[in-house]
Image (tube, rainbow, N blue to C red):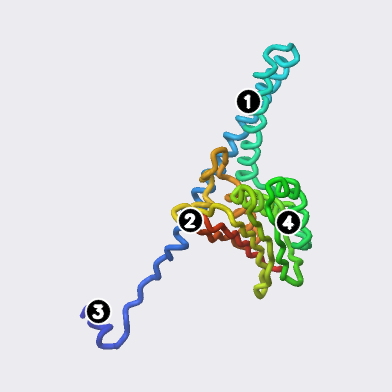
Amino acid sequence: MTNDTQNQKTGSTAVTEPAVSTDLSANLRRLDRLANIGLVSASVAHEIKNGLVAIGTFVELLAQKGEDKEMAALVTKELHRINALVTQMLKFASPKPAAFGKVRMHELLDHSLRLLEHQMQGRLISLSRDYRAEPDAIRADESQLQQVFMNLLLNAVDAVGNNGDVIVGTENAGEHLLIFIRDTGVGIPQENLSRMFEPFFTTKKNGTGLGLAICRRVVEEHRGRIEVHSQPKQGSAFIVTLPRA
């Protein structure tokens, strides 16, 4: 007698092992890909930094001798740009351990906005605060979270250009705190939305594609999540959800 016949007679059904969910498989593949990218990025970045030191020293000597100062200044500017890129790669590949402590989110956001105040005023960008979360304190690494929100705010300013609006707000969501940054900028094409947090994916001419990837990693290390909603020519909204404890 076959198992199928036995099951029909007993009224039982065959038990099969549950398949691994598509989401879990995708996350595992992403983590594996990020691990490989991290190893490569770290080794490449260290080698580039070593080369930059020698090149920078040589350019400085040329400038001191008065040999083509204009070209020396141009090369120096490019070296600084490359060094900034390499520094971001190292941050992505070898992040520092988080140092958790009490963080007041509204104070952190205000501090980040003060750093961008001059830039926003120069572009005639209207800034609105909509702080509704009370209390606004969470346990987090303040330095790492500031890096996240500075990145998101800079992206919003770039997207808006001139004479646009940026709205920064917070809300309570049970045991979580929601922080959102909205802009009235150019928006994001639908085909790019799912790739916005991928390492090295960028639509900016001089972008590195690491800023948002670092943001996601930091937020996930805080047991939170980050998402984006956008429509072309209608602006974008980045929402960060963080646990209170």
Residue position marked by numbered label 1 in the rendering: 51
Dot 4 or dot 3: first in sequence order is 3
Residue 194 is labelled as 2
Q: Which residue position is annotated with label 3?
A: 4
Task: State how far apart marks 2 and 1 are (Cα).
Answer: 36 Å
Q: CA distance from mark 4 to mark 3?
A: 57 Å
Q: Marks 4 and 1, Cα distance to the nearest angstrom?
A: 33 Å
Query: Is tag 4's residue or tag 2's residue first in the polypeptide sequence?
Result: 4
Secondary structure under the numbered disc 4 in the rendered image: loop
Q: Are marks 4 and 1 in contact (CB under 8 Å)?
A: no
Point out the frontmost of discs 2 and 1. 2
Q: Which mark is residue 141?
A: 4
**Closer to the camera in the image, 206 or 159:** 159
In-image side of 128 versus 82 (left or right): right
Measure how far apart labels 3 and 2 are at the Cα level. Answer: 44 Å
Between marks 1 and 3 in the image, the one whose residue lies nearer the viewer? 1
Task: Out of 173 and 35, give the one closest to the viewer.
Answer: 173
Q: Mark 1 and mark 3 in contact? Answer it, CB < 8 Å.
A: no
Assign a secondary structure to mark 3: helix
